[in-house]
Image (tube, rainbow, N blue to C red):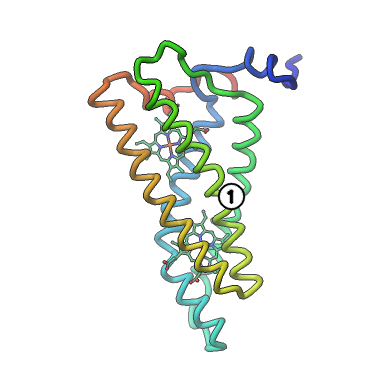
Amino acid sequence: MTTTPTSPTERAAHARHGYSSTQIAVHWLVAALVIVNWLLGDGMSDVFRAVEEGQAVNNIGPAYIHIAIGVTVLLLMLFRLMARIRRPVQTDPDDPHRILAVLGAINHWAFYALLILIPVGGAIAWFGRSEEAGDLHELLVNVTLVLVLIHVAAALFHQFVLRDGLIRRMLRPTGGT
Ligand code: HEM
Ligand code: HEM
């Protein structure tokens, strides 16, 4: 029978050098969903403006898809956050590029915060008819896109300049589900 680690010492003992198959699957699923929702964003803004101005909306379908995908991202991120806290990922104390590992960790935790706040902000905008929440939603999406560019550039830098095979961590599970 497996037990869930509860104390910080137990969690450290369970820490791994990589990610489980579920964490990897959810990582790529969320990445794809965020990109699709970003592409649907313009249509969502048009519908939101029309609804706010009391005009007729010709095609509300994409707006509902945007909301459904956004709520799915929120649920997946909450699930992922719990998995990450219960099973920390180990960093190598002798890593010669320790500063990069720290910057990477900051970027990763920023993704968790942003991808929870973005759907919550979008929901407040849509259900509360709040333009301010809509503006914040857009701002946070733009910040996320900049971080995604940095994240991808960092992954490519590891792959082709440092040649340390970091991308493998998000392709090959290291045991467990
Ligand atoms: C990961 C999840 C999400 C992403 C990446 C995302 C992305 C976007 C983008 C790119 C825009 C257009 C911004 C622009 O035109 O500059 C937008 C607008 C909007 N989204 Fe989302 N969205 C997400 C989740 C949600 C959810 C869950 C809701 C509602 C329940 C929502 C409601 C809205 C609304 C109301 C607007 C219009 C805001 C305005 O024009 O002021 N979004 N979203
Ligand atoms: C919207 C797009 C993306 C988001 C939000 C995102 C988010 C994240 C997060 C939060 C982590 C930390 C792992 C965890 O806690 O689960 C991570 C790790 C990772 N991501 Fe992404 N990611 C995205 C796209 C990509 C892309 C396109 C690539 C490849 C080019 C990539 C490569 C990696 C790698 C290699 C790691 C492992 C890094 C390490 O363990 O130090 N990601 N990503």
Which element is circle 1 on? helix
Query: Is residue 108 toward the left or the right of residue 130 in the image?
Result: left
Q: Quadrant of the C terminus?
A: top right
- Residue at x 43% of width, y 32% of height: 104
Q: Quadrant of the N terminus?
A: top right
Q: Nearer the viewer, residue 1 or 104?
A: 104
- Residue at x 32% of width, y 18% of height: 164
Which residue corresponds to mark 1?
116
Q: Position of residue 36 (x, y in %)?
A: 43, 55
Where, by quadrant of the figure, is residue 8 drawn?
top right
Query: Is residue 95 toward the left or the right of residue 66 in the image?
Result: left
Q: Position of residue 108 (x, y in %)?
A: 48, 36
- Residue at x 56% of width, y 81% of height: 51
Extreme residue in the front direction: 99
Query: Is residue 78 toward the left or the right of residue 102 in the image?
Result: right
Point out the quarter of the image occupied by ligand 2: top left
Is 166 placed above or below 48 here? above
Is 173 placed above or below 62 here? above
Does ligand 1 reach within 8 Å of label 1's beta carbon? Answer: no
